């Protein structure tokens, strides 16, 4: 009984609302995405406050769809299109397959079209992430603001700007035309990668990780890899990367609230089911000739996921993959990760020589400090540890550096 | 078995802007409570009452008149009610104490009113 209620509420709040928002938004048009969200939110609130009194209706999703539709009509009351809309806004058909796992939910065509719209390349990647979290994932503005370390009013304004930009660019909530599909799909993957990173390594604040963002990013990435329109080796590689990295979430921060380096993480606590999912996607990603940045990043994630320990990791292979990655995607972040791998493969002196200038990057300073410590140059290391601590973006990371300084 | 009415008192329009997780947690508790009682046949009825449209009818100058009443700005309203089946006052109280309504906000409270039934009245008259 209890389990049934929980599952029902959860599936309504997550699956049904996202499907209903997509179905309504598609019919209402890009300019009225907010109306669709408000109407569905209203329907959900009504359901949750009414149902305890009257028992759960036989078809909960159809009930929600009808209430949301009527609410949308009320919100649009002043508009002349109201009558025409009443004909079009038929309740969404009840759910087909129910999925159990939080990473397993697939996207229907409406939801995919909405994801394409809110991740349109006319929007900046930050805007896409915010918009997707709100509209496709159904998170509240305060929740998004907390996760992205911003003020709710700033997030609300960003959403208003994003909707206006979509409308003025004439973006419709529909699948992209075939010739634009590769570029549009890449824009979605980029946004989901950023969403994942915000969750995996928050840019500031008390918490190092925001698991909700990671869960949503993995789910959407897997859905992209499954949907007939977007399935491709690149989508599979992307899903592999996110799932394999998400497997390490449980050990990113230790029980004492201190961030843990990869080499110190208890690997038995990594999520085996996610690693298995990731490996399935990685296998599928190898079907084409295409070799994307997602393939290379996923391969590195897989090497870590499968290695029994940091010492038993094939660091030479990782260095080689980073070399390939640098030839496609040359960025300071990749250079830093490459140098760290060189240090593990060939020793701290080689790693130190490969490091790019830290340039105000806390991770850069931390890498310098660690290699210098290993070389016995503790005085020089101390300066870098201090800089890294002062620049640390989150509390768990600051605590880790504080501990290294004391030891 | 006797019937009792649980009147759910609350401050109008509280908790309208909860984060999703909090709202789901509340809904879960509420529905689990209600569906659990329903499965045991302990809920005989209930309605959520709308917040707006409250009117008071009174006789004024010899005629019934409907008005917003003196309590248009009420600090305490009945947001809904349940009619429950319980064997005695103690069970009715236990059910009410378990109702998530009271835990949702410090200003929430539940009024328990035994429902007069013809059977009870006959029993009382006979006894």
Image (cartoon, coloured by chain):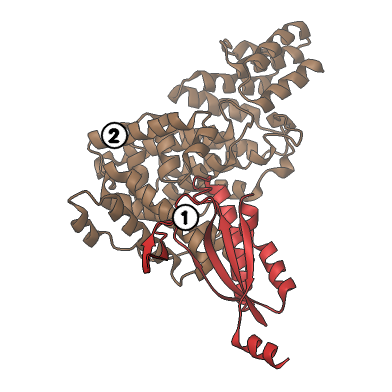
Chain colours: A brown, B red
Instruction: Determine the residue positioned at 64% across, 36% down.
Output: A304
Residue on which disc 1 sits: A45
**Left or right placement of residue B109 versus residue B17 in this view:** right
Instruction: Give whichever of A197, A224 is nearer the camera.
Output: A197
Q: Which residue is mark 2?
A: A164
Is residue A269 visible in this depiction of the protein?
A: yes
- Pinpoint the chain carrying mark 1: A
As drawn, which residue projects farthest toward the top?
A379
In the image, taking residue A340 as reference, residue A85 lies left or right, namely left
Horizontal side of residue A173 vs A125, given as left or right: left
Q: Nearer the viewer, residue A363 or A6?
A: A6
* Disc ID at residue A357: none
Q: Is residue A257 above or below residue A344?
A: below
Residue under the image location 29 percent in, 63 percent down: A90
Q: CA distance from mark 2 to mark 1?
A: 27 Å
Residue A326 position in % (x across, y down): 49, 22
Say if residue A291 shows up in the picture: no
Secondary-structure class at tag 2: helix
Query: Upstream in the sequence, badge 2 or badge 1?
Result: 1
Q: Position of residue A314 (x, y in %)?
A: 65, 32
Q: Which label lies toward us, 2 or 1? A: 1
Q: Where in the figure is residue A279, as x and y percent of width and height?
A: 56, 46
Question: In the image, what residue occupies the spot 27% across and 59% down?
Answer: A89
Quarter containing the N terminus of chain A: bottom right
Quick check: A345 left or right of B46? right
The local crowd at label 2, few if under 14, some if 14 to 19, many if 20 or more residues have their Cα within 10 Å, is some
Q: Which quadrant, please, contains the C terminus of chain A? A: top right
Q: Position of residue A193 (x, y in %)?
A: 48, 35
Classify B5 as above or below A280: below
Give the image quarter of residue A360. Answer: top right
Mark 2 vs mark 1: same chain? yes
């Amino acid at each position: 009984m209890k389990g049934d209620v929980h599952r029902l509420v959860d599936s309504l709040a997550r699956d049904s609302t996202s499907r209903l928002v997509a179905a309504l938004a598609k019919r209402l048009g890009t300019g009225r995405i907010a109306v669709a969200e408000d109407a569905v939110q209203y329907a959900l609130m009504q359901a949750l406050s009414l149902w305890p009194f009257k028992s759960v209706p036989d078809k909960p999703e159809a009930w929600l769809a009808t209430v949301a539709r009527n609410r949308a009509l009320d919100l649009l009351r002043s508009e002349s299109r109201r009558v025409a809309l009443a004909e079009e806004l038929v309740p969404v058909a009840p759910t087909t397959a129910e999925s159990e796992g939080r990473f397993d939910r697939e996207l229907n065509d409406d939801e995919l079209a909405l994801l394409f719209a809110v991740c349109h390349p006319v929007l900046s990647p930050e805007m896409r992430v915010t918009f997707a979290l709100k509209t496709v994932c159904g998170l509240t503005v305060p929740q998004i603001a907390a996760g992205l370390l911003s003020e709710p009013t700033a997030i609300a304004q960003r959403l208003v700007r994003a909707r206006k930009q979509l409308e003025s660019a004439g973006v419709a909530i529909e699948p992209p035309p075939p010739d634009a599909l590769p570029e549009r799909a890449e824009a979605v993957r980029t946004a989901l990668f950023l969403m994942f990173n915000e969750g995996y390594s928050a840019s500031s604040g008390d918490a190092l990780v925001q698991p909700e963002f990671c869960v949503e990013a993995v789910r959407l990435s897997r859905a992209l890899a499954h949907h007939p329109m977007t399935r491709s080796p690149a989508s599979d590689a992307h899903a592999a990367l996110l799932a394999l990295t998400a497997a390490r979430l449980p050990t990113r921060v230790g029980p004492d609230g201190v961030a843990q380096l990869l080499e110190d993480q208890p690997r038995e606590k990594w999520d085996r089911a996610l690693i298995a999912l990731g490996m399935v996607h990685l296998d599928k990603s190898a079907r084409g000739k295409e070799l994307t940045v997602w393939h290379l990043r996923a391969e590195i994630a897989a090497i870590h996921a499968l290695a029994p320990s940091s010492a038993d990791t094939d660091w030479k292979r990782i260095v080689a993959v980073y070399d390939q990655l640098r030839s496609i995607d040359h960025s300071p972040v990749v250079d830093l990760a490459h140098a760290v791998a060189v240090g593990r493969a060939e020793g701290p002196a080689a790693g130190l020589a490969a490091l790019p200038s830290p340039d105000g990057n806390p991770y850069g300073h931390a890498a310098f400090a660690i290699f210098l410590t290993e070389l016995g140059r503790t005085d020089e290391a101390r300066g870098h540890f201090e800089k890294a601590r002062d620049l640390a973006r989150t509390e768990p990371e600051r605590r880790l550096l504080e501990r290294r300084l004391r030891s | 078995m006797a019937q009792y009415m649980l009147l759910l008192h609350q401050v109008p329009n509280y908790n309208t802007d909860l984060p999703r997780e909090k709202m789901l947690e509340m809904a879960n508790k509420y529905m689990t409570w209600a569906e659990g009682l329903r499965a045991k046949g302990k809920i005989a009825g209930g309605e959520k009452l709308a917040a707006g449209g409250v009117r008071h009818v009174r006789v004024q100058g010899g005629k019934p008149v409907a008005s917003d009443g003196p309590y248009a700005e009420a600090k305490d309203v009945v947001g809904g009610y349940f009619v429950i089946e319980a064997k005695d006052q103690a069970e009715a109280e236990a059910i009410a104490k378990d109702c998530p309504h009271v835990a949702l906000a410090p200003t929430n409270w539940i009024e328990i009113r035994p429902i007069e039934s013809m059977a009870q009245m006959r029993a009382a008259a006979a006894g």
